[in-house]
Image (spheres, rainbow, N blue to C red):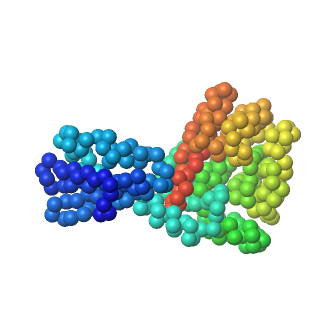
Amino acid sequence: MKMHETEIEVKSPDGKSTLLLSGDKNSISVAHLEADQGVKFEATVDLQSGMPALEGLHHFLQGVVDPNSLTPITSQRLTNLGHRSKQPMRRLSGAFLTTMHVLLTSAEYTNFTYDLWSTSKKYLAHTTAMVTRSTPEEIQTYIEEAEQDETLHQHIRDMTAALPDHVRAGSDDEIRFGRRLGWYAVVRAIKPKFIIETGLDKGLGAVLLCAALKRNAEEGKPGRYLGTDINPDAGYLLAPPYDEFGSIAVGDSLESLSTVTDEIDVFVNDSDHSEDYEAAEYACIAPRLSDDAVVIGDNAHTTSKLVGFAEESGRKFLYWQEKPADHWYPGGGIGFAFR
């Protein structure tokens, strides 16, 4: 191990384990040794990276704590750092490998798409069943329906392939809906007459929701979709035949929402993710919500505005946290306000 200006050697009471801590103003090194196996763990951290969490250890190494005055229990705890480091280092190693896999296999740089772990989808089915007064088995059927809709998937692939190169360069061919599967299941379960979604990006949520409306119409329960976005190029995935069931209003979502006169059965907030704007959208649509409306918040993992709206309007609130499969992004979630 590289020698530093300050070095501390701590042995376990039984003498079998040794922890070497060394450092100077530039770096800190840690090594864990076993008497019969040699070095078990070794790492050096560059303090020039400006990590303030390391300052306490650096001060310790500079003699703020006299190593000769360490109690046996403190010595043992320090020696255990090597063993304790194994689990977090494995997690960091796994996260690094996953990150590299995504960087090398995906072209996306915003609004990331991913599959969900099977357990995460099961939790979603149970949560959505409570919101829609359905059974988890029914919701699971709808989730699988969206995942296995090859006509929809091919439509998305075709629309993506037709994009200009500079846009296509940031898109993937693989179809992954993530938490939007919950949106789809809500629409299939309650058969709404009118849906509004604010914030579209490429329109993955829009086309998925209209695919649900298409199936509802085939079952004799028609409905329509309205999406709003300030970007005139947003929502390009909502194209024939799915645009038969929905349309897009370009402009500020609050201005667009203020012109709506029909009752809203499902509302999806996914536009400006600031707390004030999110709250303003809920306040704007509140008088137009039907009695059994479901309000979905795509921002509920970062703000409490939807739960506050639910409490103020006499609605129940549930939150589900998604768990992306094989992706570095930790995931968002779905907030539900309902009666």
Point 22% across, 59% down: residue: 33
* Quarter-of-image position of residue 305: top right
Q: How many marks?
A: 0
| Camera-side residue of 304 and 50 | 50
Check the picture and name the quadrant holding the N terminus: bottom left
The location of residue 232, given as percent across then percent down, is 83, 56
| Camera-side residue of 27 and 154 | 27
Point 24% across, 44% down: residue: 67
Residue 337 lies left or right of residue 54; in this view the side is: right
The location of residue 339, given as percent across then percent down, is 64, 33
Residue 257 lies left or right of residue 266; in this view the side is: right
Residue 80 appears in view? no
Residue 254 appears in view? yes
Point 49% across, 57% down: residue: 117
| Camera-side residue of 73 and 263 | 73
Residue 283 lies left or right of residue 299; in this view the side is: right
In the rendered view, would you say 161 is above or below 121?
below
Point 41% across, 45% down: residue: 55
The location of residue 217, given as percent across then percent down, is 75, 54
In the rendered view, would you say 292 is above or below 173?
above
